[in-house]
């Protein structure tokens, strides 16, 4: 079984993903890490050098490679679900879980993030919150196609693992 974690950047996919994988006895893979390892360039540097369109093509190729895995939780990038037919493909090849967060929560997480986030470099608090809202408005229709929605304020990791197992037993 493959489990694809989707949602906005800093929504918790890369931090909760390994815990979920451990709870289920699965492997964990971060799609951004796979890209950085294979191409030996940071996502930030790739974006700056080649642009978002080239990154999305590369990301799509790497996503396709994950379909060969089994018993793996895969954390995707914030935009992965929104390009090409990625969301439909992830839904066909496994279970998708939308990591839902509010704007204020995302803002605080992005501010404290250790990962380099290009959108943070020149934005004031107000501008950044508007940018998050704009992105979310565009992306939520894709995110909401997920099989499950995870809100850490309503569900802990054990409950999420139980929901995954219930889903798996239904299909």
Image (cartoon, rainbow, N blue to C red):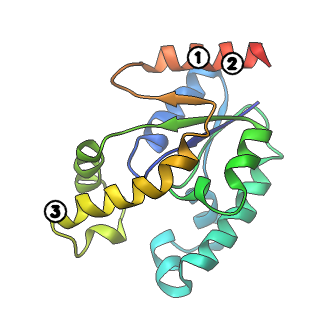
From the viewer's perspective, tell me whether residue 79 is left or right of residue 34.
left
Work out which residue is located at the far left of the displayed protein and give it: 125
Quadrant of the rendered image containing residue 31 = bottom right
Which element is circle 1 on?
Answer: helix
Residue 59 pos. (x, y %): 65, 64
Mark in the foreground, 3 or 1: 3
What residue is disc 2 on? 167
Question: Of residues 116 and 162, which is closer to you in this image?
Answer: 162
Cα distance, mark 3 to mark 1?
36 Å
Please tell me how crowded label 1 is: few (under 14), some (14-19), or many (20+) other residues with Cα within 10 Å: some
| Contact check, label 3 and label 2, Cβ < 8 Å | no
Which element is circle 3 on?
Answer: helix
The numbered disc on residue 163 is 1
Which element is circle 2 on?
Answer: helix
Q: Say if 37 sits above or below 10 in the image.
A: below
Q: Say if 65 sits above or below 50 in the image.
A: above
Q: Quadrant of the C terminus?
A: top right
Q: Residue at x 44, y 50 (%)?
A: 8
Mark in the foreground, 3 or 2: 3
Cα distance, mark 3 to mark 2?
39 Å
The numbered disc on residue 130 is none
Residue 35 pos. (x, y %): 62, 64
| Contact check, label 1 and label 2, Cβ < 8 Å | yes
Q: Say if 141 sits above or below 161 in the image.
A: below
The numbered disc on residue 126 is 3
Q: Looking at the image, tell me whether mark 3 or mark 2 is earlier in sequence order.
A: 3
Q: Which residue is drawn at 72% across and 45% down?
A: 90
Cα distance, mark 1 to mark 2?
6 Å
Q: Which residue is drawn at 35% across and 71% down?
A: 118
Question: Of residues 50 and 142, which is closer to you in this image?
Answer: 142
Residue 115 pos. (x, y %): 37, 59
Question: Of residues 144 and 42, which is closer to you in this image?
Answer: 144
């Amino acid at each position: 079984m493959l489990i694809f974690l989707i949602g906005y950047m800093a929504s918790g996919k890369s931090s909760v993903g390994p815990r979920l994988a451990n709870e289920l006895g699965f492997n964990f893979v971060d799609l951004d890490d796979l890209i950085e390892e294979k191409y030996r360039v940071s996502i930030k540097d790739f974006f700056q050098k080649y642009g978002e369109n080239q990154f999305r093509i590369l990301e799509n190729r790497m996503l396709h490679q994950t379909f060969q895995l089994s018993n793996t939780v895969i954390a995707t990038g914030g935009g992965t679900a929104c390009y090409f037919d990625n969301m439909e493909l992830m839904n066909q090849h496994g279970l998708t879980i939308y990591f839902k967060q509010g704007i204020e929560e995302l803002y605080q997480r992005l501010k404290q993030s250790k990962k380099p986030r290009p959108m943070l470099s020149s934005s004031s608090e107000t501008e950044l919150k508007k940018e998050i809202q704009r992105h979310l408005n565009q992306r939520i229709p894709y995110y909401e196609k997920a099989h499950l929605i995870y809100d850490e304020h309503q569900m802990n990791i054990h409950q999420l693992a139980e929901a995954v197992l219930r889903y798996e037993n239904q299909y």
